[in-house]
Image: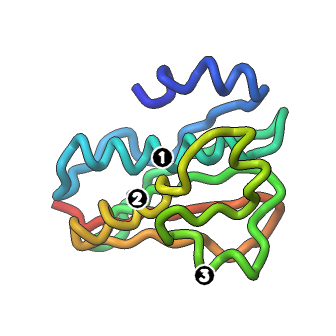
């Protein structure tokens, strides 16, 4: 499981993982690619969320769509960076990215996986501290 794979890093970052919503729902998607997209979103939340914070993953079905939202309690994302987040190799904070690893490809990969399946991904408007990304796919 994604949670199991990232558990050592979650422990190191002192974050709690919470899953809410549906436990299973059918979508039209390649299982490996869907897993990669969710992994990338959770991995980013672990890297950039607040130490001692909560990372939440929620799965909800609404109409013809399934929404998977991953949220953290980190510092959030500055308005000037929001339009470029899904570009390949784009990093919000170059120094922090070197420190935490990564190539700046994670969110670009998520975007391409979503589009390849007739879906979308977006950064939710900030209503509180942190970042929340919603990955949306058509239901089966």
Give yes or no for contact between labels 3 and 2 (Cβ–Cβ under 8 Å): no
Report x, y in % for residue 63: 31, 73
Q: Is residue 64 above or below residue 39?
A: below
The disc placed on residue 40 is 1
Give yes or no for contact between labels 1 and 2 (Cβ–Cβ under 8 Å): yes
Instruction: Give the alpha-carbon distance from disc 1 to disc 2, as whole Å.
Output: 7 Å
> Is residue 139 left or right of 4 when viewed as pictured?
left
Instruction: Tell me the SS state at disc 2.
Output: helix
Report x, y in % for residue 40: 48, 46
Q: Observer-nearest residue: 124 or 87?
A: 87
Query: Which residue is located at x 50 percent, y 71 percent?
Result: 87
Instruction: Give the alpha-carbon distance from disc 3 to disc 2, as whole Å.
Output: 15 Å
Q: Observer-nearest residue: 94 or 54?
A: 94
Q: Is residue 19 above or below residue 134?
A: above
Query: Which residue is located at x 47 percent, y 56 percent?
Result: 105
Disc 2: which residue = 110
**Quarter of the figure that contains the N terminus:** top left
Instruction: Give the alpha-carbon distance from disc 1 to disc 3, as whole Å.
Output: 19 Å
Query: Which residue is located at x 76 percent, y 80 percent?
Result: 79
**Quarter of the figure that contains the C terminus:** bottom left
Q: Earlier in the sequence, mark 3 or mark 2?
A: 3
Q: Earlier in the sequence, mark 1 or mark 3?
A: 1
CA neighbours of label 1 inside 10 A, class few (<14), some (14 to 19), many (20+): some
Instruction: Tell me the SS state at disc 1.
Output: helix
Report x, y in % for residue 91: 64, 61
The disc placed on residue 83 is 3
């Amino acid at each position: 499981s994604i949670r199991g794979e990232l558990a050592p890093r979650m422990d190191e970052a002192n974050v709690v993982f919470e899953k809410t919503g549906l436990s299973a729902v059918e979508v039209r998607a390649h299982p490996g690619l869907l897993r990669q997209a969710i992994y990338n979103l959770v991995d980013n939340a672990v890297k950039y969320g607040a130490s001692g914070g909560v990372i939440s993953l929620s799965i909800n079905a609404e109409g013809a769509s399934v929404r998977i939202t991953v949220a953290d309690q980190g510092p959030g994302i500055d308005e000037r960076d929001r339009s470029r987040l899904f570009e390949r190799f784009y990093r919000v904070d170059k120094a922090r990215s070197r420190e935490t690893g990564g190539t700046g490809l994670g969110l670009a990969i998520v975007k391409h996986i979503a589009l390849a399946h007739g879906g979308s991904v977006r950064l939710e408007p900030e209503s509180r501290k942190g970042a929340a990304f919603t990955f949306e796919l058509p239901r089966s």
